[in-house]
Image: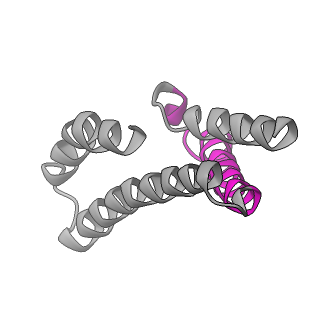
């Protein structure tokens, strides 16, 4: 769900203005690549959490997904705090930490 939201809602808001920004093509190409890598990562984290539910070694999958989500949250908050305060007005700093907290709760309860 997060990947679909990222691509369908976020791409027009981020990638279209980026491509029209006048930045060099190598810069916009790398940023576009990074945007889509984020979508793939969201799909991967979702798959890991799904495996955590059905696989006998589910806790391992849940731990990896929780650590990945937490790391994304730390990166987003770190960037918002120290390099670009405008990130606070975007979704970037928020969902990853919530996902990591839910994963941690699941590990503690399960």
Specify the quadrant that holds the C terminus.
top right
- Which residue ends up furthest to the bottom in the rendered image? 26
Q: Position of residue 32 (x, y in %)?
A: 27, 60
Q: Where residue 103 appears, x then y in whole percent? A: 71, 41
Q: Residue at x 73, y 63 (%)?
A: 57
Q: Which of the colour schemes (rainbow, by chain, secondary structure, one colour) is used?
A: one colour
Viewer-closest of 2 and 48: 48
Quadrant of res 39: bottom left
* Highlighted range, magenta: 59-88
Residue that appears at 19% across and 49% down: 21
Is residue 34 found left or right of 97 in the rendered image? left
Residue 35 image offset from top left, x and y in percent: 35, 56
| Residue 73 is a magenta residue | yes
Residue in view at x 16 percent, y 45 percent? 16
Q: Position of residue 9 (x, y in %)?
A: 26, 33
Horizontal arrangement in the rendering, residue 21 relative to residue 82 (left or right): left
Residue 75 within the segment the image draws in magenta: yes
Q: Going 45% across and 30% down the picture, which residue do you hit?
A: 90
């Amino acid at each position: 769900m997060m990947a679909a939201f990222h691509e369908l809602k976020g791409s027009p808001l981020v990638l279209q203005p980026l491509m029209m920004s006048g930045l060099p093509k190598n810069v916009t190409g790398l940023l576009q690549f990074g945007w889509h890598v984020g979508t793939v990562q969201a799909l991967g984290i979702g798959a890991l959490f799904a495996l955590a539910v059905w696989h006998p070694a589910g806790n391992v999958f849940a731990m990896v997904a929780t650590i990945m989500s937490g790391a994304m949250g730390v990166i987003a908050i770190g960037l918002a705090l120290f390099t670009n305060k405008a990130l606070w007005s975007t979704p970037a700093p928020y969902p990853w930490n919530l996902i990591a907290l839910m994963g941690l709760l699941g590990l503690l309860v399960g």
